[in-house]
Amino acid sequence: MTGALGAAMLLASVTSQAQMKPEDQVHYRQAGYSFMSWNMGKIKAQVVEGSVPYNKEQVANAANAIAAIANSGMGALYSPETTQEKMGKENTDLKASFFENPDEARKVGSTFVAAANQLASEAATGDQARIKAAFGEVGKACKSCHEKFRAE
């Protein structure tokens, strides 16, 4: 089952790549991450820092938005043509090593999706300690990808 799912995801990714210009892939990819970052900021302010009063509904909505984007098939927005080496550092931060290490890229991506889903699940409970812990795991997943595949 996992092999079939992986093959289907790869096929969908290749099909989407063929239909989209590299510049558009980068644009939509960056927009997705910007939207996730904005929602992470809402959770951070309310649950981690406490600089904004906690609102369970807002935090749950933010976590759901993050999970929705993580599960949206963002892999289709990555192609070898969208690396910094191909497009220039003014356009993207993606390293070519992302495509040279597909197993590691898949692992990092899967870890992120799982962490995002767990954050949404914990946010639904309203338990701020559990939300904070899950938020930390999402941050670790983001950092892992940045350290491995994002150029400075």
Image (cartoon, rainbow, N blue to C red):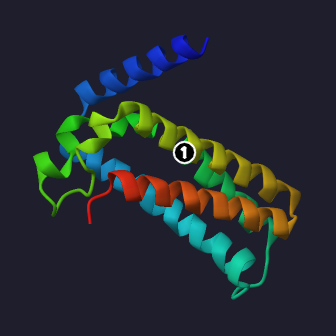
For residue 16, which quarter of the picture?
A: top left
Q: Is 112 on the left-hand or right-hand side of 28?
A: right
Secondary structure of residue under mark 1: helix
Q: Quadrant of the C terminus?
A: bottom left
Q: Position of residue 66 (x, y in %)?
A: 59, 54
* Amino acid type for the residue under numbered disc 1: Ala
The residue under the point 44% across, 57% down is: 33
For residue 130, which quarter of the picture?
A: bottom right
Q: Position of residue 108 (x, y in %)?
A: 49, 43
Q: Is 143 on the left-hand or right-hand side of 135?
A: left
Q: Classify 24 as above or below 66.
A: above
Q: Quadrant of the N terminus?
A: top right
Q: Classify 80 as above or below 152.
A: above
For residue 90, which quarter of the picture?
A: bottom left
Q: Classify 26 as above or below 36.
A: above
Name the residue furthest bottom: 51
Crowding near the residue tagged with mark 1, few <14, some 14–19, many ≥20 C-alpha atoms within 10 Å: many
The residue under the point 25% across, 27% down is: 19
Q: Is 134 on the left-hand or right-hand side of 148?
A: right
Q: Is residue 21 visible?
A: no
The residue under the point 43% across, 38% down is: 104
The residue under the point 65% across, 58% down is: 137
Q: Position of residue 125 (x, y in %)?
A: 87, 57
Q: Which residue is mark 1?
A: 70
Q: Is residue 132 visible?
A: yes
Q: Position of residue 67 (x, y in %)?
A: 62, 48
> Which of the two residues, 134 or 12, is positioned nearer the viewer here?
134
Instruction: Count the numbered circles shown.
Output: 1
Q: Classify 152 as above or below 91.
A: below
